[in-house]
Structures are given as C-alpha cells and as structure tokens.
Amino acid sequence: SGIRAYRVTGVPTCALPIPNPSKPQPAGTSAGSGASSKVPMLPSVKLAWGIVIIVVGLVLLVPFWPLGLLLLGGGVWLSVVGFNQRKQPKWQVRGLLRKASQNPGMRDALLGQALALDPENPEALAAAAENSYHKEDWVAADQLFERYLTKAPDDLQAQLHLGFSYMNAGETDQALKRLEPIRATYAAGEGPTPLINAVAIGFLKKGDAAQALEILKTLPLRKQTLDDALQQGLLLRSLAHWELHQKSGAISDVDRLYAINPEHAGLDKVREP
C-alpha cells in the first residue's frame, strides 16, 4: 500500500522559544530568563580564598613584612565576609541554585528547597519557572513566571517564555497579551520566527485567520531551505489559508511542506487501504 494523500493535523503547540542574541538581558536577572549571567563569588569560595591569602601572608610576614601584613589583613577580612555571608538566605539560595544546575536528578528538590528558604527570591523564582517550563508543566511555569516578573518586569526573555507557556496551557488571551507587545518591538520581517509563529497560533485559536495570515507574511518562507521554525510557519500559513477558504494557497503550502519534510509532525498521512 502507498500514501494516497496527507492532511494537516491541526494547530500545533508553540515550540520552545529560541533566545534572541540581539536583545541583551538586564543585569542581575536569573536562570534561563537572564539570571545566570554573572554569579557573584559564593561565600564558601570567599572563605577558602581568604584562608589561602592568610597562609601566604604568614609566609611572607617575616621576609617581606609590609606585603605579608597587607595580605594577612586582606585574607582575614575576606574570610570574615565569607563566613558571615554563609548565614544569609540570599547566599544559601544561590548555593542551592548552583547545586541544582550541577545535579539534574535533584533539580526539583533543590529548587523546592530554595523557594522554601526564600519564596520571593527572584533568582529562585526564575530558576524554578525555567525548570517547570522545560518540563512542559505550563500551569506551574505560568505562576512562577508571573511572580518573577513582578520583581524583574524588564526581563524580555521571561516575558517571551511566559507568553509561550500561556499559549501551550490554552490561555490564548493571556499569551497574546504578553507576546504582542514583544512582537511590536521588532521591525517587519525581523522578529524571531518562534515568536511570529506563537502569535499566529494565538490568532488562529481565536478564529482570526486573517490576522494570523498577515503576521505570517512577515516570515521568509520563500527561502529554498526552511529550518524547523520556518516549517512550522509554513504549516500555520496553510491553516490560515484553509480557514479563509483559500484552498489553492493552503494546498500549495502543504505540498511544499511535504516536499521539504515528508515526516513533519503536522502532516498526517492517509494511506491506501
């Protein structure tokens, strides 16, 4: 038996967004949303370096007493700072987050400990939100991102992830509320493909195929080769054409998608009996 025809299976979910390197994240934000950029020296590291500097200072104290005395004083100060910081919740949270990043199997438990220690810590909230997001636990991700964004409202990457999460959770209006302002910051044809696709998905779900089609027209779908995100855009454009009763446009897009990737997840092959 051979393949007789193929059909589009329906509106897909949003693919995980691709971080946009042209949009730098604000300093001091967290996790994949932006907070893992520059992690300050942990108290335990300060304490260890302080001890090392003290030892060096003691060795140099007699032959080079000014330098030795300076190193000794600096080492004592760094050790005291590190020792005191170990007791602060902020630093305890950072220690747990570092362990979570290094131990995937214990990540859920360690992130839970961090949030239990300080439920409003923005770094813990961002890390937990990203963790839920990548596990595709959309409801938990929505709640955690919302809490995080009250503390870091300018984190565009977190806004983007929240919009995708809302869309995949079926909260279309909430998703568009987050994604449309981000899309508006880009000139026509310059927006990231996953973002364009996500907004188009939202309008298709709301029954506004005309608006979805206008948005998808900004994608470079005439390129000879299309990556996964552009293939999804082509699939979405075929759906928009179909909803608008533009049968020839829909068939043309599906034919092209099939020629590019016959195994695309959005195509359902109908085989001969």
Image (tube, rainbow, N blue to C red):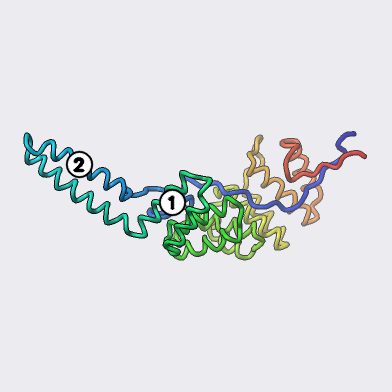
Give whichever of 77, 121 is nearer the camera.
Answer: 77
Estimate the x, y position of residue 239 in percent, counting from the top left.
Answer: 75, 52
Kindly tell me whether residue 257 is visible in this rendering. yes
Instruction: Locate residue 137, reporting x and y percent.
Output: 61, 56
Give the class, few, some or many, for how many residues have Cα within 10 Å of label 2's Cα (few <14, many ≥20). Answer: many
Q: Position of residue 173 (x, y in %)?
A: 63, 65
Residue at x 59%, y 49% (from the top left corner): 16
Instruction: Return the residue at label 1.
Output: 97
The amino acid beneath tag 2 is Ile
Upstream in sequence: badge 2 or badge 1 = 2
Q: Quadrant of the C terminus?
A: top right
Q: Is residue 248 left or right of residue 216?
A: right
The residue carrying pointer 1 sits among few (fewer than 14), some (14 to 19) or many (20 or more) residues within 10 Å by Cα, namely: many
**Quadrant location of the N terminus in the rendered image:** top right
Q: Residue furthest right?
A: 273
Vertical placement of residue 106 versus 144, above or below: above
Look at mark 2 in the image and give the residue it sits on.
53
Q: Quadrant of residue 226?
A: top right
Which residue is at 60% across, 61% downward? 139
Give SS at disc 2: helix
Which residue sits at x=27%, y=44%? 48
Above or below — where is 77 with respect to 142? above
> Which sits in the foreground, 150 or 261?
150
Left or right relative to 192: residue 225: right
Query: Please, what is the three-letter code of the amino acid marked with disc 1?
Result: Leu
Identify whether 263 is placed above or below 235.
Answer: above
Q: Are marks 2 and 1 in contact (CB under 8 Å)?
A: no
Q: Is residue 157 visible?
A: no
Secondary structure of the residue carrying tag 1 is helix
